[in-house]
Structures are given as structure tokens and as C-alpha cells.
Amino acid sequence: MTSGIEFAVLLSVLSAVGYAGAAVVQEQLAAAGHRSAPHWLMTLLLTGAGAGLHVIALGYGTVGVVQALGTLTLLFALPIAAARTRSRATAGAWRDAGLTVAGLAGILVLTATPDGPTVLTGVKEWWLTTITVAGVAMLACAARVASSPLVRSLLLAGASGAAFGVVSVMIKTETAGISAGGIGAASVPALAAIALLAVGGLLLSQLSYRGGGLAAPLAMVSVANPVVATVVGIVLLGEGFRYGTTGALLVLAASALTTRGVVGLASVTAAAAPSAALDAVVVPGPAAAPAKVLVTAGLG
């Protein structure tokens, strides 16, 4: 890994710690009936710190790596949940944590930094936004007519994860453009698309937790987010992996390990979460940073 990737890993890990801490405070805030000013302030600070570190990390690492490392929020929630409930984490929970770390380590080792620019042209941005909005809308419409609450929850969570993944890609390209050409290089349509997808992703995420529990939608959004971001990064930003086809197959295997671990950790997090929190807030995690700021601003 290059020094840039290593710095991105460090920032992403710190960002995940901030989001995990914010999740704990949000649960306490929900239990207090949203009337605790200190809890609101602490949630805002922790979420803001996680969001800022996430955005900075995107400037140093590939989208796939940064988004995948966002799943560490669930891992860090494991000891926090155990301490909060005064219980020991089960062997299965630690197994899931180990699978998540092992899979992420494989992805990091095999990730190759692109040689070309990471700035999207106006045409590519337009197509990316159009396809994303259409895809998210289709999933939302399918959720609306779904007969099963679980299927509805998964469809909404998948739409939310897709929106957040694309938001991170667009944030990366916009920050790269601004770094190279100054604030004048910022694309107003792209910034508008980021705001639209972030807010839409947040609302879909909140809706996904109604009637579907916490574990299933949390796992879905945690997996869909990095998957979508990685695919877009490969197709549009030239991101990829070492060792050609062999490396790609190894990354798929590592991703499968991470997915299995994330699903297990999501179940642990859901089991430890107070029921009051399920109706009140979105658990911070690997979703796009701007949406998390909106949670603490009063939309949660």
C-alpha cells in the first residue's frame, strides 16, 4: 500500500470509531426522549468528526477501500454494546468480527491505486446521477408494493446503501476537482445531486427500520454501500485490484468473508439496541458522511 492508502485507512478507522460512539449516544438520547441537550451536542460532535474524517479519507484512498472500512463501525460497536449491557460478547460475535477484519485486510492488500485522475466529466456525472436516481426510485417503488415487511425493509435499505455509495464517489471526485482547480472547479449540479441523494438515502434508511427490525436493514445498507461504491469506482474512476483476474477473484472471496462478518455483527448490534432507539434514530455506520450530519441536525 502507498502512504496515501495507509493514511486513508487510519482516517477511515478513526471515522468508524466516531460513528460507533455516536450510535451509543443516539441510543441514550432516544431513551431520554430526545430531551437531553448534552446528548444532542455529543452526538453532533461525534458524528461531525466521523463525517469530516470520512470525507478527508476519500481524498487519499480509493472509494472501495474507504467505504468498506466503514463497516468497522459495527465491529467497534461490539465491545461498546457488551460494556453497555454488562455482558460478554459471544464467541460467535468475535468470530464475525474476525471474519470482517480478515476480509477487509484482504481487500486492502489487493487494492491498486489508479494512475489517472479521479475527476468525473460532466457527462459521466449526469449519467451516474440519472442511473442512481432511477435505480433508487425503482427499489423504493418495489418496496412500496412488497407484501413482506422484511422484503420491504431490505429493498429500502438497499436503495439507501446505493444512494450513499454514489454520494461518496461524487464527494471524492468533487474534492479532487476542487483541490486541483480551486473552489471555482466545483460543479453546482454535482453538489445538488450529492445533497439530493444524501437526503434521500437518509430518509430511505429511516423508513427501512420500520417493521423490519434493525439487523436486516443494517446489514443490507452496510453491504450495499461499499459494493455500489466499489463498482462505480472501478467503472468510472479506474480503480481496480492487483494481480488481474486472480486478484479480482481473491477480492470476491475477501468480500464474501466481510459480508458474512457484517451480517453477524449487525445481528449483535440489533440485539443490544434498546427498542426505543429503533423508532427514533438511524444507527451511524458506513453511509455517506453528509447524511449523518443531517441525523444529528434534527432529522433523526
Image (spheres, rainbow, N blue to C red):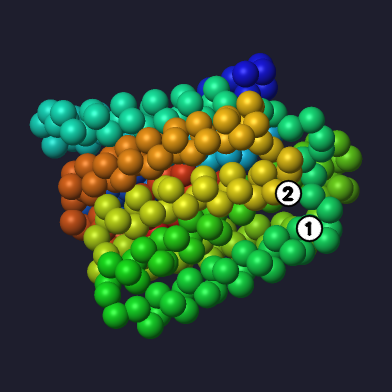
Badge 2 element: helix
Q: Is residue 149 visible?
A: yes
The residue at 83%/58% (across/down) is 122
The image quadrant of residue 71 is top left
Q: Residue at coordinates 88% horizontally, 48% vertically from top-left?
A: 184
Residue shown at 62% from the left, 64% from the top? 132
What label does residue 151 carry, if any? none
Query: x and y percent of residue 96 in the render?
Result: 27, 34
Label 1, secondary structure: give it: helix
Residues 28 and 59: in front is: 59
Q: Position of residue 211 (x, y in %)?
A: 25, 69
Query: Do the residues bearing badges 1 and 2 touch, measured as CB atoms within 8 Å?
Result: yes
Q: Say which quadrant the N terminus sits in.
A: top right
In depth, the one of 160 and 82 nearer the eye is 160
Disc 1/disc 2 C-alpha distance (Å): 8 Å
In the rendered image, the vertical position of residue 172 relative to residue 291, given as above or below: above
The residue positioned 53% from the left and 57% from the top of the image is 162
Please tell me which of labels 1 and 2 falls first in the chain: 1
Q: Quadrant of the C terminus?
A: bottom left
Image location of residue 278, percent across then percent down: 26, 58
Which of 190 and 297 lies nearest the eye of the viewer? Answer: 190
**As displayed, is residue 179 above or below residue 140?**
above
Left or right, 132 with respect to 178, comes to left
- The mark tally for this picture is 2
Q: Amino acid at mark 2?
A: Leu
Specify the farthest residue to the bottom.
145
The residue that disc 2 covers is 236
In the picture of the structure, the residue carrying the numbered disc 1 is 124
